[in-house]
């Protein structure tokens, strides 16, 4: 921990000494008319630097820059754009250590997970870079009198709005395909976690023509809102809360923007009596307690079949008790501090809600202030928590808590499992554990979710579609789905 702290301090020094601003039209700038705010680290709530929140005029400048750069960028030969995106990936790899350290201090995610993030970000850029030359290709349909063929062109400048939970990773998933498609970008990172977005902008400055990538720090209600209303912006990709998706849909209505939303979830992991006990136990623990439970696809509801319920819950309690909570830079840490005080208090509030609703707090249920000397009592540390004896009507089963908190519910039949799984406003992901293939396939058909994993924890396969149903989102990205979003399909009909 001491070595990591020292290295992180070196990387953070410049953020501490200079206000973090924006990157607009190839210039790093503090903009005009914005307001400064303190960026706090969740490890102890100290200030790790000032950030400039953009004014509406700053956002306008970024959107205009993206508009002006669009024609040249979208017409740059595919081979050249491919080369630039690979160069971007190379720089991510070179700065991987810095990205991991800075991100970990900014958002509280344990360094053990952030270490891979920069490398995965680089892989995202390479995956979409390789697709650039073919992205415009469409279908050809030959008929007796006509031939129809389709081509795809970049939709235009796009707005990308990202959240604080894994800011770096989520940004690369959105921005890499947008640039590969030929779009120019205005990125608005989450106000709570601006630092890795600034590093991305620095790499963009080295690698891309000016105006292609713009990054504007600021709040949702003014800078973010303006981005979604600006007439030059043709599509908006948001990763955030469901309520934010509704706001943005309204804000973008007048300019008829195309929208892609990746929103909240209350995802079930359904464990049947015949599941592989150890593997399913590992997956249940990993999918809610890793990344501090601040993960959209986390399995925050455990649906456990009655036959193995007691044995499974006993083993689970043991595992949850043994999780190592600690400073986000400690390599031993499995659960770090939660991103910010407001969110931390929201998570803590569910302990009383659970009691009031009649659930049992089997493990955890408290803030940690003094359990370990290396945990600063001012940090946002919470005990990994397990609620048992819950039912699906309780608020702890219906609301997205977005922390290291799992709600366990017992079921008896397959039909009941489906009914409970679907009894939620969300439909992002689900996890099914059974050795019975027929049952796995029936469940996969009936559970309402954009993504299901059978006998597997979440792994993101870049060519596969990613996205949610119901209040969890609209649209898909990944592989060619990303190009469908960031490009317009044009049909050309030729008479013979
Ligand atoms: P949030 O919705 O509060 O903020 C997300 C982003 O939207 C921020 O950059 C914010 O400034 C911006 N924003 C807020 N209001 C806006 C407005 N009116 N106009 C324009 N922009 C606006 O979300 P958060 O609290 O940062 O992140 C946590 C949420 O994100 C959780 O609900 C989580 O499930 C969700 N999430 C979903 C996925 C997914 O893939 N489905 C992935 C990660 C996180």
Image (cartoon, rainbow, N blue to C red):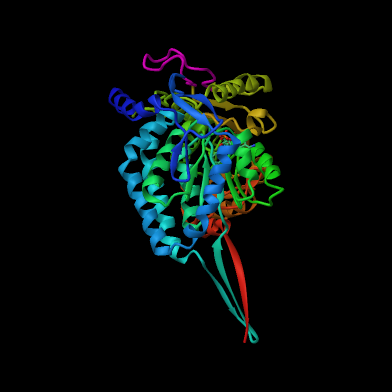
Q: Main secondary structure of the magenta part?
A: loop
Residue 128, above or below 393: below
Where 328 sits versus 118, above or below? above
Q: Position of residue 320 (x, y in %)?
A: 47, 27
The residue at 68%/50% (across/down) is 255
| Residue 440 point in image, percent of width and height | 56, 51
In the picture as drawn, the residue positioned furthest to the left comes out as 3
Is residue 372 part of the magenta span, yes or no?
yes
In the displayed structure, would residue 214 be above or below residue 155? Answer: above
Asked if residue 356 is among those painted magenta in the image, a careful observer would answer no
Quadrant hosting residue 139 = bottom right
Q: Quadrant of residue 223?
A: top right
**Count of numbered marks:** 0
Query: Residue 318: image x %, image y %?
Result: 45, 26
The reply, left or right, for residue 207 in relation to residue 288 is left
Ligand 1 quadrant?
Answer: top right
Give the residues drawn in magenta, as a range: 363-382
Between residues 471 and 445, which one lies in front from this camera angle? 471
Q: Residue visible at 68% across and 41% down?
A: 246
Q: What residue is rendered at 49% in x and 58% in y?
A: 182
User: Relative to 436, does residue 115 appear above or below in the rendering?
Assistant: above
Nearer to the camera, 448 or 205: 205
């Amino acid at each position: 921990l001491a070595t990591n702290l020292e290295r992180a301090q070196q990387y953070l020094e410049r953020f501490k000494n200079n206000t973090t601003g924006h990157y607009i039209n190839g210039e790093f700038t503090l903009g005009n008319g914005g307001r400064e705010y303190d960026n706090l680290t969740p490890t102890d709530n100290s200030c790790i630097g000032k950030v400039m929140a953009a004014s509406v005029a700053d956002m306008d400048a970024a959107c205009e820059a993206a508009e002006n750069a669009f024609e040249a960028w979208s017409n740059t030969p595919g081979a050249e754009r491919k080369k630039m995106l690979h160069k971007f990936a190379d720089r991510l790899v070179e700065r991987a250590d810095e990205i991991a350290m800075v991100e970990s201090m900014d958002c509280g995610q344990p360094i053990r997970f952030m270490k891979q993030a920069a490398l995965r970000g680089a892989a995202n850029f390479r995956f979409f870079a390789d697709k650039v030359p073919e992205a415009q290709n469409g279908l050809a349909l030959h008929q007796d009198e006509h031939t129809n063929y389709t081509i795809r062109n970049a939709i235009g400048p796009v707005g990308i709005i990202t959240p604080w939970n894994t800011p770096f990773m989520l940004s690369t998933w959105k921005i890499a395909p947008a640039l590969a498609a030929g779009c120019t970008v205005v990125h608005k990172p989450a106000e709570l976690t601006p630092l890795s977005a600034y590093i991305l902008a620095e790499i963009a400055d080295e690698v891309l023509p000016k105006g292609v990538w713009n990054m504007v720090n600021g709040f949702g209600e003014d800078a973010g809102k303006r981005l979604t209303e600006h007439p030059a912006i043709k599509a908006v990709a948001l990763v955030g809360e469901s309520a934010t998706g509704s706001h943005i849909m309204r804000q973008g209505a007048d300019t008829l923007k195309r929208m892609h939303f990746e929103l909240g979830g209350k995802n079930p992991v359904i464990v049947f009596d015949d599941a592989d006990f150890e593997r399913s136990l590992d997956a249940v623990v990993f999918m809610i307690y890793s990344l501090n439970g601040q993960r959209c696809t986390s399995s925050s509801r455990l649906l456990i079949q009655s036959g193995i319920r007691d044995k499974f819950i006993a083993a689970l309690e043991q595992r949850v008790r043994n999780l190592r909570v600690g400073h986000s830079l400690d390599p031993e840490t499995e659960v770090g501090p939660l991103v910010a005080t407001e969110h931390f208090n929201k998570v803590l509030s569910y302990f009383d809600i659970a009691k009031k609703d009649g659930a049992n707090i089997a493990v955890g249920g408290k803030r940690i202030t003094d359990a370990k000397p290396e945990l600063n009592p001012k940090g946002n540390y919470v005990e990994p928590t397990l609620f048992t004896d819950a039912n699906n009507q309780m608020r702890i089963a219906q609301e997205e808590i977005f922390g290291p908190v799992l709600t366990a519910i017992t079921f008896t039949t397959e039909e009941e499992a489906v009914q409970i799984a679907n009894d939620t406003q969300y439909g992002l992901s689900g996890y099914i554990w059974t050795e019975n293939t027929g049952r796995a396939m029936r469940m996969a058909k009936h559970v309402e979710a954009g993504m299901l994993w059978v006998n597997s924890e979440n792994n993101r396969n870049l060519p596969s579609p990613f996205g949610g149903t119901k209040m969890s989102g609209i649209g898909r990205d990944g592989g060619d789905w990303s190009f469908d979003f960031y490009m317009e399909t044009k049909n050309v009909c030729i008479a013979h």
